[in-house]
Image (cartoon, rainbow, N blue to C red):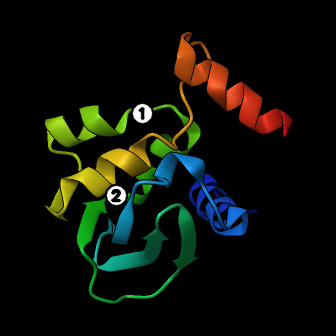
Amino acid sequence: MVDATTRFLEDLDQREYEPLLAKSSGTLRLDLHEGAQTTHWLLRIDRGRVQVSREDQEADTVVGTSPALFEDLATGREDGVAALLRGDMTVTGDLRLVLQLERLFPSPPDSRGPRRHLQGQREVH
């Protein structure tokens, strides 16, 4: 069974182009810490073109959090900015890249407003 984190990141990789990242460029590494083990994901973003791998390489921005929290982000059960402000997530490097990526996470199922509306349109296409 594939977890929500893997599903979210593999889907992002398969899209190849993400319009919400059209003005973004850089590399972002996710370090998902669980005890002594860390899982790495590397996102290369070039004006909307996205490549995702499991490489542990230097990046412009490094996000550190737990696998459970990232799972909640990937499913819309948690908000990335709120998690960052609470200190449940750390960011080293360019915070703007994190804020751009945060726009891709799903909204909670019971939310309303333009973000939820746009996600519904994306699923249709």
Other-residue count near label 2 (Cα within 10 Å), few / some / many at <14 / 14–19 / ≥20: some
Q: Quadrant of residue 40?
A: bottom left
Q: Which residue is mark 2?
A: 66
Query: What is the total number of numbered labels drawn onto the structure image?
Result: 2
Q: Quadrant of residue 103?
A: top left
Residue ID at (24%, 74%): 60
Residue ID at (84%, 40%): 125
Task: Compare residues 15 and 29 and report the one nearer the observer.
Answer: 15
Q: Is residue 15 above or below residue 29?
A: above
Q: Earlier in the sequence, mark 1 or mark 2?
A: 2
Q: Could you tell me how far apart the alpha carbons at marks 1 and 2 are, in whole angstroms?
A: 13 Å
Is 54 on the left-hand or right-hand side of 11? Answer: left
Residue 3 image position (x, y, % from top left): 64, 58
Give the residue type at disc 1: Glu
Circle 2 — which element?
Answer: loop
Residue 50 image position (x, y, % from top left): 55, 69
Q: Quadrant of residue 10?
A: bottom right
Q: Is residue 69 visible?
A: no
Farthest residue to the right: give it.
124
Is 89 on the left-hand or right-hand side of 105? Answer: left
Give the residue type at disc 2: Ser
Residue ID at (78%, 36%): 123
Residue ID at (53%, 33%): 76
Q: Which residue is mark 1?
A: 78
- Indicate which disc residue 13 carries: none
Task: Compare residues 20 and 64 and report the one nearer the observer.
Answer: 20
Mark closer to the observer (1, 2): 1
